[in-house]
Amino acid sequence: MENIFDSSYYSFTKRGLQCIGQWPFQSSKEKRILRCLTIFIITSILIPTITKCITSIDDIDVVTEVLFIIGLIALAFTKFFNWTILEDIMIQLLLTIKRDWQSLIDQRDIELLQQHSERGRKLSVAFATFIYGNLLLYFCTPAIPKILDIFYPLNETRPRLFLSQTEYFIDHEKYYTYILFHAYISSIINTACIVFFENFFAICVCHACGKFEILKAHLESLHLDGTILIEETSLADFYFIKNRIRICSDLQTQTLEFVDCLESSYCVALLFTVGINIGLIVVAGTVAMIKNSEPSESIRMVCITADLIIHLFYSSWLGHALIVQNERVLDAVYQSEWYRFSSRSQLMLLSIMMRSLKPCQLTAGKLYIMSMQGFGAAMRTVMSFFTLFNSMR
């Protein structure tokens, strides 16, 4: 399958990464131009945001809101520079995916990998749709005063709303349209860095889950062959079984190496991502409380808080799915009726069983395990910090 990355399974994520210059197989010139453009656009909103923070240092409410925007930009930059620095590992992951597709011969194996790849595509589209859907609602909030002026007019024009607190040292009312357009463009690019970083993570995790599913199917079908008896009747039978178990062992080794490569490439970035995410959820909730007298602003912050929670849940759930899929490999060994094998064949299965006992998990800096248990712990931490932060206001 020569053009696997042009298939429906990967094309959505590929196109998104190409737009920000992070698809490793683009030409060097194209990558440099798009990466510089991405950095320029995000930095162009970061500078006036930091300036606003400095000029409003005495206003804790404004500083809190500005720090939230700075946190979002830091989240995007963390993901963006992670792949820029670790591009070689990204290439290795993609080449492994391509090699795995090309090496599949059995139709059952192909169908299993297709199922998990399709699952990864659906997750990617659903995640991007949810995040950009909420972003669209966020974009609509500046139009609320104009709509209210039409249906519930006041004696004076309602003040205009901006997407975020910024300081350009110009007349904000006079250049309102330009400032708003700048905020729209930078928000779209900033969000793209976050969304497609997670989508690439999703397709890699789903690919690993697909490989584990293939391994599971091979192990479960070992006992279906009539040549497997309590003792192999001939040397030919033994070598036949040995070859099938060797295929399973090689498949497990390749999959675990792929997961290790994925772990090494995402470990540090996920640490910053989880930390920033937890902090932003707390700050976003606090800003929503600050803006409770302004329904449009409060709703906007609630939407962003929902995005952040879903973002953390999405990454944690993917890591949890990988853990569960690896645990099923051990169950498959038991279902293979290994006790019917000869002692020599049982010893060959032992290495597969031992490796399956070790948790196959993705971590954030070795401190946070990407799992549903980790997500629950993170949410408890969020609530504790949120309570503390609001009591200090």
Image (spheres, rainbow, N blue to C red):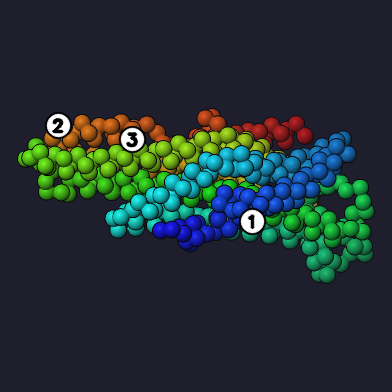
> Does the image show residue 307?
no
Q: Out of 341 and 171, give the one closest to the viewer.
A: 341
Quadrant the N terminus occupies: bottom left
- Check disc 1 and report the residue beneath it: 19
Tags 3 and 1 touching, CB below 8 Å:
no
Q: Residue at x 30, y 58 (%)?
A: 107
Identify the mark at residue 356; answer none if there is no mark.
3
Q: Secondary structure at mark 3?
A: helix
- x, y (%) of residue 137? 69, 59
Q: Secondary structure at mark 2?
A: helix
> Does the image show residue 36?
yes
- x, y (%) of residue 220? 24, 46
Tags 2 and 1 touching, CB below 8 Å:
no
Outermost bottom residue: 150
- x, y (%) of residue 188? 69, 55
- Check disc 2 and report the residue beneath it: 343
Identify the mark at residue 379; answer none if there is no mark.
none
Q: Amino acid at mark 2?
A: Ser
- x, y (%) of residue 274? 59, 38
Q: Amino acid at mark 3?
A: Ser
Q: CA distance from mark 3 to mark 2?
A: 20 Å
Q: CA distance from mark 2 to mark 1?
A: 56 Å
Q: Would you place residue 373 above or below residue 15 in this image?
A: above
Q: Residue at x 46, y 48 (%)?
A: 95
166 lies left or right of 218? right
Q: Amino acid at mark 1?
A: Cys
